[in-house]
Image (spheres, rainbow, N blue to C red):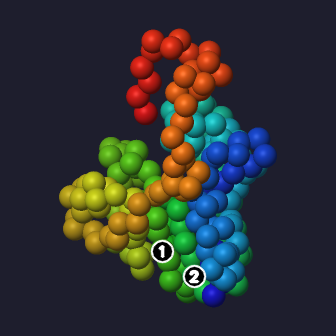
Amino acid sequence: MKVLMITTSYPTECNPTRGVFVYYLVNNLIRRGIDVNVLTLNSYKSVSGGAGILPSLGSSFMSLLLFPVYWLHFYFKIILNARKYDLIHSNWGPTGFFSLLAKPFHRKKIILTERSSQLIFMKNKFFRFLLRHAYHNVDKLVVLSNFSRSEIANRYGGVKSTVIPNGVESSKVSKRLDRIKLKKKFGVPLDVKIVI
């Protein structure tokens, strides 16, 4: 099986933690023998860099100007690439919308994993239209928590979804951390409580 993984966030040399959950998903699928390729646009740093697309739109005039160009570019990349795959997996509501918009050209099943709680609560009518269309029309909607499933069903008209938690590799965090060593290493006073 060949899967096209579509995402706006994927690790780069400059930002190795951005979209790291998508990176882990891709690598786990590859280890299971699935042929996965990632489609992302890293050349629009003012739109999708930093804290992400939504914060960039609120803080940068250049992001607002490039936003339509970014999505048009993404749309054409989907059209040009999706035909070569058996399945499209979009990560984030807007990528799901554009995958659906391109479906007459690729005719592939689409999985959408909604990774943004910001979008679920979005009041912007344009984004809500995109999300409603995507949530109701993808072949499978995946959310990261029961809370997200409930909110999407309530806010977007009874949409059915499957919960697959966006996990952390427990093997990488299962060791008990020496808090005193960590506080000293990062210059945090020993009497300060840190809650994560």
Left or right placement of residue 181 versus residue 155 in this view? right
First in sequence, mark 1 or 2: give its number. Answer: 2
**Closer to the camera in the image, 149 or 139:** 149
Helix, strand or loop for disc 2? strand
Three-letter amino acid code at disc 1? Ile
Which structural element holds mark 1? strand
Q: Is residue 42 visible?
A: yes
Q: Residue 85's image quarter?
A: bottom right
Quadrant in the picture for residue 140:
bottom left
Which residue corresponds to mark 2?
87
Q: Residue furthest right?
A: 13
Mark 1 is surrounded, within 10 Å at the Cα level, by few (under 14), some (14 to 19) or many (20 or more) other residues, namely: many
Look at 56% across and 16% down and name the residue there: 188
Q: Could you give the CA–CA distance between mark 1 and mark 2, rounded to whole angstroms? A: 8 Å
Circle number at residue 111: 1
> How many callouts does the rendering have?
2
Above or below residue 143? Residue 68 is above
**12 or 168: nearer the eye?**
168
Looking at the image, residue 181 sits to the left or right of residue 126; the answer is: right
**Closer to the camera in the image, 141 or 67:** 141
Residue at x 63%, y 87% (from the top left corner): 1
Residue 54: give x, y in percent of width and height.
Answer: 51, 41
Q: Which mark is residue 27?
A: none
Quick check: marks 1 and 2 in contact, CB under 8 Å?
yes
Residue 108 appears left or right of 13: left
Query: What type is the residue that disc 2 sits on?
Result: Leu
Q: Describe residue 175's horizontal placement relative to residue 151 as left or right.
A: right
Residue 61: x and y in percent read 61, 31
